[in-house]
Image (cartoon, rainbow, N blue to C red):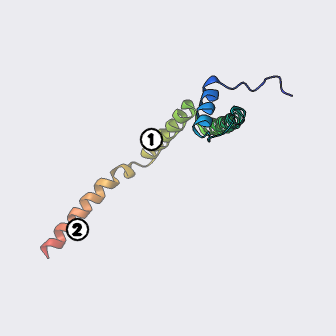
Amino acid sequence: MSKYKNKTSTETKEEANKIAKSTQRPGQSKDQTKLIAQGIRKGIEQYKKRYKSKARELDKKLKSTKISDSEINATSDKKMQRTQNISKSSPSIKYLPWFLLVLSWVGFLIWTQQ
């Protein structure tokens, strides 16, 4: 047996009693109503346990997949260094968009004059 007994909260007990009384049939004894309330209470407890375990598993997954801020900063610094190295190594890449723009305008002017 475990060291800790499953103590149900008063809210759970009250909720189970309300549900049991609302579903009570005519001629049903108080003992039967108590048994129904006890079953409802156990069902609520099991639901809460499942919900808590699923929430814990989800938190573990989220924590394992999260990337720390320092790792994000390190990767962004590496990307910036790569782009700086590319622009330093080949300055023609920096002017490529402008060259293509001028070339397209020249082509457009030649095409319209025909």
Nearest the eye: 28 or 78: 28
Nearest the eye: 21 or 3: 21
Residue depicted at x 22% and y 68%: 107
Q: Quadrant of residue 83?
A: top left
Secondary structure beneath label 2: helix
User: Looking at the figure, which quarter contains the C terminus?
Assistant: bottom left
User: Which amino acid type is marked by label 1?
Assistant: Gln
Mark 2 or mark 1, which is nearer the start of the sequence?
A: 1
Q: Is residue 3 left or right of residue 54?
A: right
Percent from the top left, x then y, of residue 49? Answer: 69, 35
Secondary structure beneath label 1: helix
Outermost residue to the front:
27
Q: Is residue 36 left or right of residue 14?
A: right
Outermost residue to the left:
113
Percent from the top left, x then y, of residue 34? Answer: 70, 32
User: Which amino acid type is marked by label 2?
Assistant: Gly
Nearest the eye: 51 or 92: 51
Q: Residues within 10 Å of mark 1 (few under 14, many from 20)?
A: few
Residue depicted at x 63% and y 29%: 12
Percent from the top left, x then y, of residue 48? Answer: 65, 35
Dot 1 corresponds to which residue? Answer: 84
User: Looking at the figure, which quarter contains the N terminus?
Assistant: top right
Up-down relation of residue 92 to residue 63 (above or below): below
Dot 2 corresponds to which residue? Answer: 107
Asked whether the beta carbons under mark 1 and mark 2 sit within 8 Å of each other, the answer is no
Up-down relation of residue 93 to residue 10 (above or below): below
Residue depicted at x 32% and y 54%: 97
Nearest the eye: 81 or 56: 56
- Tell me the tag on residue 19: none
Q: CA distance from mark 1 to mark 2?
A: 32 Å
Q: Residues within 10 Å of mark 2 (few under 14, many from 20)?
A: few
Q: Is residue 79 left or right of residue 15?
A: left
